[in-house]
Structures are given as C-alpha cells and as structure tokens.
Image (tube, rainbow, N blue to C red):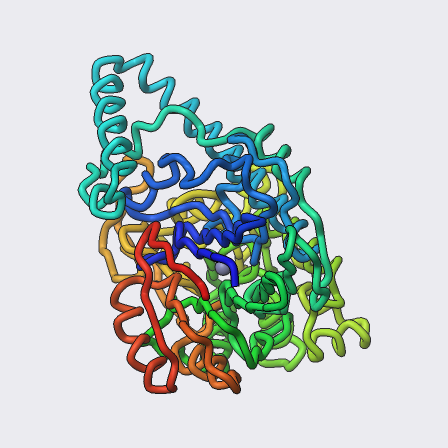
C-alpha cells in the first residue's frame, strides 16, 4: 500500500474543534472542520493558521451540524478551499442555520470590540499585543503546550471576526447533500458512506474507504454517537468492521440517568408548575434538545400525565431547526413515524406559542400563569433565556429546569450548583426561584452505550483512536476499550500517524 497518513487537528483530549486530515499519494480529505469552544487556550486555536494549504484539500466530509464539528468551514473557504463539502441532506440544512448564526454573532462581537477600542485605545492596544503573543505561542512547534500558557484575556481582545456572513454563505455554496447509506466517491481513490449516528437529525458515522492499487483500507469516524432509544431519530448504526476507528469519548467513565427517569422528572416539574400557577423555564439547545423536550411534553400530555399548560417556544433558531426536522420525516425512528402516520405531529405541542419578535419574548413574563417556556441557549451564556432568567430569578413561583449539560464557568453551571447570588448584565441578583436539573436527556451515548456500540465489531480495528473527550473521560474509557480487546491510542493535537 502506498503511504497514507491521518492527522488529528482537533477534538484531541478535549471535546471541541473536531478536525481530521486523511492524506494519500493522490488525495487529501478533511473530516469535520469544527470550532474550538470553551476555555481560552482552546479558543485561540481557531486563529492558528490551518496545518495545511486549504486550497490543496480535495473534499471535506461533515459528520453533523454542531458548531464544534462545522464551525471553521467558512474560515476554511475564506482561506482558499473551494471543493465540495459532503454531508447528509438534513445536516446541510441544519448547518446553514448554525453557520449563519455563528457568523452573525462574530460580526456583532467584532463590532462591540471595535467600539471598546475606540473608547479605550490604550487598553485595546495592550490586549491586542497579548493576543498577538498568545497566537504566536499557539502557532509554535509545540502548539498544545504553548496554548495552555496563553493568557485568558487574549481571546476577548480579538477584534476581527473570524469570518463573516458572506464567508458563511460562500462555504454553504460548496455543500453537497447525500443520502444515508450511499457510497460516494469524494476524491481520487476515496469513497465515503454516511451511516446514521443517532445524535441529532442528519448526524452521521462516516465510513471512508481508500483504494490504492488492489488494496482497500477502511477508516470509520464515529462522529458524535447518540443513545439507543432516544426519541425522534434512529439509533446509532451498528458497524462491524474497520481497519482503523476513531471513537468519541465525551461521556467516558459516566453513566446517564435512565431516560424514563428524565421523563418522570420532567412531568413532575410540569405538574408542580400547574399546581402552584408558576412558570417553568427550560434553557435548551436550539437543535436537538428543544425538539426532544417538545416531543416528551407532547407524549406526556397525550398520556394524560401532565396538565395542558401553555408552552412558549422562545427561540427563532429552534423554530427554524424544528422546520428542518419536519422536512426530514424519513430520518425519524419507527415510533416517531408511527405518530406521523396517525396524524399526531411528534415534535409539535398543541397550541404552542412561537415568539419571533423581541417584544413578544419580553411579554412572556407578563402572560397569564401557569406557563412553560423553552428558550435558547442551553447554558444561559446568551440568547433570550438570559432576559427571562434575569426577570424571574427572584420569583419563588418560577422553576428553572436544566435539561442539558452546563459547561464549567457558565451562568447555567453557577445556578445549577446552587448559587445564592449571580451577576447578570453587571447586576448582582439574589436567587429565589426553584432550581432543578434533569441529567437523563443527552444527545451522546454514555460509557456503557459506547462500549455496547464497540461490541458490534466482529473484527477489531488495527488501532482505535479515542478522540473527542476530556482527559479524565478518556483515562476512564481507554482501559475498558482495551478490555474488549481493542488496541487503543489517545492522540494529541496535531499528532500524525501513518496508516498501513
Ligand atoms: Zn454533536
């Protein structure tokens, strides 16, 4: 076999920035091109120049629409990449929402930094210097070590948008939507097949086959793996063979609360809100979690488990994402399709109130109680949810119900951990509302589910690369994968291996 190389350009010992480069003598294919999110030493990596000339990539393959998998594609396109980006059709439509939103937020952030710089030229200049130093450090030979030392202030000082709405549109113009299960030639000697990953609508495990002379090598990229039994979408596809495997490890060492318990807790919170004539406020990710929560509320209502409280869906992005879900009924699992066949729209709650204008969003707090609100974003770091939390945080009749993961350092995490006072928009506010959490809703397989998926392999890959996990999760997960008889490796940022 001719030389073949795989380079790990993101989601190494961390959960964001997914990006892998596969090179053969004849072609270069990129798998995911995600944004680094979270801590400053991760985020600065978005600004480190690409590890390859973007105009020399033959194709990009995208596993799913989450920003940490697709978020750098506009930057790639603006840097010279002009070739096709392959994804399932559902992913193409969701990615459009995600990238345009990301570009808009970056343009806004850049404008606000420029305003700050006009008012505080000296501070801005100092910050720019620090940013430049951090970026130089991050771009050095040992970028992983260097970025760990980057000062946290650096990131806030970045004044240029990483990309614009025009760049996002240029990248979107490169997308080619394909069907699940179809083997497509993506570059000379390389094909890709997208298999349902059961994570969010359109999500895929990508099976790449490399044909060199008379040999074939198969590399499977798990992408983000969903949970068997999740509502609406299908279960992750069983894969039985690969020469090389990359598997995500977000929840290595962790077991989720059972989904039945999550649904029971959701029903209990709704009943309590009905009894106390209160407000149930649920911060939720716009894509995936919102549709799942609406689905479960609709099921609980149909079963007569909960009273029919008004539901406000206060997220334009989530409404658009729901439209995409409705357009891909053929991606739904059997249960959801059976509901559709009975004319019971599975991701619609009866008489739900969709708010689009900002004034309608603000009016929700004055509406007749009891009521429920689902608003973005999921960790209360921005979006309409922030205003609602601010307005209702001192109200004992409000229940703030967390239905998703809260990242360290976010307002959501502070509230979830029982903070008695929090700062929002520069104001210190006392917390008098009820705070509850449900951990059983997750778009990711937990450790037993990841191991169960690995159990489908009838022949073991030569190497199983453990990616997309924090170091603790990977340390817990790796020995269990080995115990199943897999040879494992945990690659670092920009590590490169030869595949034979
Ligand atoms: Zn994801």
Whether residue 267 sits left or right of residue 396 in the image: it is: right
The structure residue drawn at horizontal position 52% and vertical position 64%, both measured from the top left corner, is 1
**Vertical position of residue 479 compared to residue 18: above or below:** below
The x and y percentages for residue 249 are: 38, 68
Q: How many discs mark residues in the rendered view? A: 0
The structure residue drawn at horizontal position 67% and vertical position 57%, both measured from the top left corner, is 88
Whether residue 304 sits left or right of residue 474 in the image: it is: right
Nearer to us in this view, 305 or 210: 210
Whether residue 107 sits left or right of residue 485 in the image: it is: right
The structure residue drawn at horizontal position 50% and vertical position 35%, both measured from the top left corner, is 75
Q: For residue 9, say whether it is visible.
A: yes
**Vertical position of residue 328 compared to residue 52: above or below:** below
The x and y percentages for residue 236 are: 57, 74
The x and y percentages for residue 270 are: 50, 70
Nearer to us in this view, 295 or 83: 83
The x and y percentages for residue 225 are: 50, 69
Q: For residue 204, say whether it is visible.
A: no
Quarter of the image with the C terminus in it? bottom left
The structure residue drawn at horizontal position 54% and vertical position 38%, both measured from the top left corner, is 56
Nearer to us in this view, 332 or 81: 81
């Amino acid at each position: 076999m001719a030389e073949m190389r795989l380079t790990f350009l993101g989601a190494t010992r961390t959960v964001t920035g997914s990006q892998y480069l596969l090179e053969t003598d004849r072609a270069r294919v990129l798998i995911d091109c995600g944004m680094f999110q979270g801590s400053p030493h991760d985020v600065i990596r978005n600004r480190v120049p690409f590890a390859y000339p973007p105009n020399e990539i033959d194709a990009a393959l995208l596993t799913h629409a989450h920003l940490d998998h697709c978020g750098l594609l506009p930057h790639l396109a603006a840097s010279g990449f002009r070739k096709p980006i392959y994804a399932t059709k559902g992913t193409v439509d969701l990615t459009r929402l995600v990238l345009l939103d990301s570009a808009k937020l970056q343009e806004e952030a850049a404008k606000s930094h420029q305003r700050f710089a006009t008012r505080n030229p000296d501070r801005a200049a100092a910050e720019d210097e620090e940013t430049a130093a951090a970026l130089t450090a991050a771009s050095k030979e040992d970028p992983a070590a260097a970025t760990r030392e980057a000062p946290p202030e650096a990131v806030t000082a970045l004044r240029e948008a990483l990309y614009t709405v025009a760049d996002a549109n240029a990248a979107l113009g490169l997308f080619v939507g394909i069907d699940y299960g179809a083997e497509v030639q993506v570059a000379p000697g390389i094909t890709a097949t997208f298999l349902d990953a059961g994570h969010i609508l359109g999500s895929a495990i990508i099976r790449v086959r490399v044909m060199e002379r008379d040999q074939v090598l198969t590399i499977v990229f798990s992408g983000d793996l969903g949970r068997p039994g999740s509502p609406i979408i299908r279960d992750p596809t069983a894969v039985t063979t690969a020469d090389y495997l990359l598997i995500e490890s977000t929840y290595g060492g962790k077991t989720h609360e059972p989904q039945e318990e999550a649904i029971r807790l959701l029903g209990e919170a709704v009943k309590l809100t009905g009894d106390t004539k209160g407000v149930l406020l649920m911060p939720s990710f716009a894509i995936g979690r919102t549709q799942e929560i609406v689905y479960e509320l609709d099921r609980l209502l149909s079963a007569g488990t909960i009273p029919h409280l008004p539901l406000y869906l206060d997220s334009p992005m989530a409404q658009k994402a729901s439209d995409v879900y409705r357009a891909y009924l053929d991606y739904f699992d059997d249960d959801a399709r059976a509901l559709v066949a009975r004319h019971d729209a599975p991701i619609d709650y009866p008489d739900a109130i969709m708010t689009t204008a900002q004034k309608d969003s603000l009016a929700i707090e004055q509406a007749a109680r009891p009521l429920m609100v689902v608003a973005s974003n999921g960790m209360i770091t921005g979006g309409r949810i922030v205003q609602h939390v601010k307005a209702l945080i001192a109200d004992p009749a409000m229940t703030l119900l967390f239905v998703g993961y809260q990242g360290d350092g976010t307002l959501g995490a502070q509230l979830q951990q029982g903070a008695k006072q929090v700062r929002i928009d520069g104001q210190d506010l006392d917390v008098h509302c009820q705070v509850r959490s449900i951990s059983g809703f997750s778009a990711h397989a937990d450790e037993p589910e990841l191991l169960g998926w690995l159990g489908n392999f009838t022949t073991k890959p030569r190497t199983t690369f453990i990616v997309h996990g924090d170091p603790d999760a990977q340390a817990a997960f790796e020995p269990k994968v080995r115990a199943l008889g897999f040879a494992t490796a945990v690659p670092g940022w920009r590590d490169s291996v030869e595949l034979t």
